[in-house]
Amino acid sequence: MSSFSQYPDPDYTVVHLSDTHFLADRRPQFGSVDTDRGLRRALDRLRGELGRADLVVVTGDVADLGEPDAYDRVAELIEPAAADLGAELLWVMGNHDERPAFSARLHGRASDEPQDRVITVGGLRVVALDSTVPGYHHGELTDGQLDWLRGVLAEPAPDGTVLALHHPPLPTRVKLMGLVELRAAERLAEAIRGSDVRAILAGHLHYSTFGTFAGVPVSVAAASCYTIDPLPGGREFVGVDAAHAFNLVDVFADRVVHAVVPIDSAPPVTHNSAEFIARLEAMSPTERDAAFSRKATVAPRPD
Ligand SMILES: [Fe+2]
Ligand SMILES: [Fe+2]
């Protein structure tokens, strides 16, 4: 297909899923949320509409209570989907996960240790950092983990580094979530400042939010299970079974671009046909301007 844009195709496309929160035996979360449905729908969209990707990252809370059956079921859905996309797969621990069951199923060996990982996809380095504290929901990084991270980042990667961790190093509008945020975040800032980290991917908040940390863009993916409404500005914590989403992360030589993709389907209200797009492709840039960019109708002047 000829390009309509001044920008090249991305060097890497990363699928960023988060917070699947499966329970054993397909029990519904809170007695009502069908956690499998959102994830299945997301993977169906990726298979049918994206087709290929370089990496799938799951930023934690894979299981709601750390049950082995929950890890089995999530993995049985995501592993073949990643294979169909031709993508590597990287799992990140969340506070609802339990290290022994998580590592046994997803990393091939049961362990109580922090589940930190580094993989390379072409020239892109991707680091999974385990921000969990056993027995608690808030996040912390140990001195040992930060030393390890500094060591990993000591040598730049050809296309830079993406850092993935569950607890985002950002403030949140949901006041209660402040109690379970990444504590002492400045220690992570010291570890990555001046490094080749180009993007930070996180979860935990169950709504899409973006910011910067130590000069690095941070993107938080919403959940595939339920969404926390960030607007009730008081002290409430409101979860809704709606607005499920995942993110697509396009990595270019000089920028990283995040897109929030809705999981839930809705009837289209407008679309352009494949025939129209084929006609556009056959046109010169000037003809395309006339056919697509030029306003078909002009609003009356306000005077
Ligand atoms: Fe979560
Ligand atoms: Fe979480």
Image (tube, grey):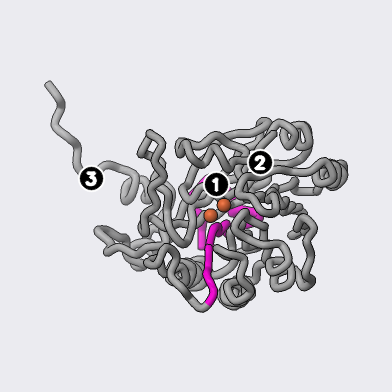
Q: Amino acid at mark 1?
A: Val
Helix, strand or loop at disc 3? loop
Mark closest to the chain's N terminus, 3 or 2 = 2
Q: Which mark is residue 184?
A: none
From the image, state whether disc 3 or disc 1 is nearer to you: 1
Disc 1 residue lies near ligand 2 with CB under 8 A: no
Secondary element under disc 2, as helix, strand or loop, is loop
Magenta: main secondary structure equals loop
Q: Residue at x 68, y 51 (%)?
A: 132
Residue 200 falls in image quadrant: top right
| Towards the viewer: 246 or 29 | 29
> Is residue 168 rendered to the left or right of residue 198?
left
User: In the drawing, what numbered circle is on residue 220?
Assistant: 1
| Residue span colored magenta | 1-24
> Is the shortest distance between ligand 1 and the CB of mark 3 under 8 Å?
no
Q: Is residue 156 visible?
A: no
Question: Which residue matches tag 2?
Answer: 254
Relative to 252, 47 lies left or right: left
Q: Are marks 3 and 2 in contact (CB under 8 Å)?
A: no
Q: Earlier in the sequence, mark 3 or mark 1?
A: 1
- Mark 2, ligand 2, within 8 Å: the answer is no
Residue 21, image x, y percentages: 53, 63
Residue 212 among magenta residues? no
- Give the Cα separation between the discs numbered 3 and 1: 38 Å
* Image quarter of the C terminus: top left
In the image as oriented, which residue stretches furthest toward the top? 303
Residue positioned 68% across, 31% down in the render? 214
Q: Which residue is mark 3?
A: 296
Q: Of the residues shown, which amino acid type is indicated by label 3?
A: Ala
Q: Amino acid at mark 2?
A: Asp
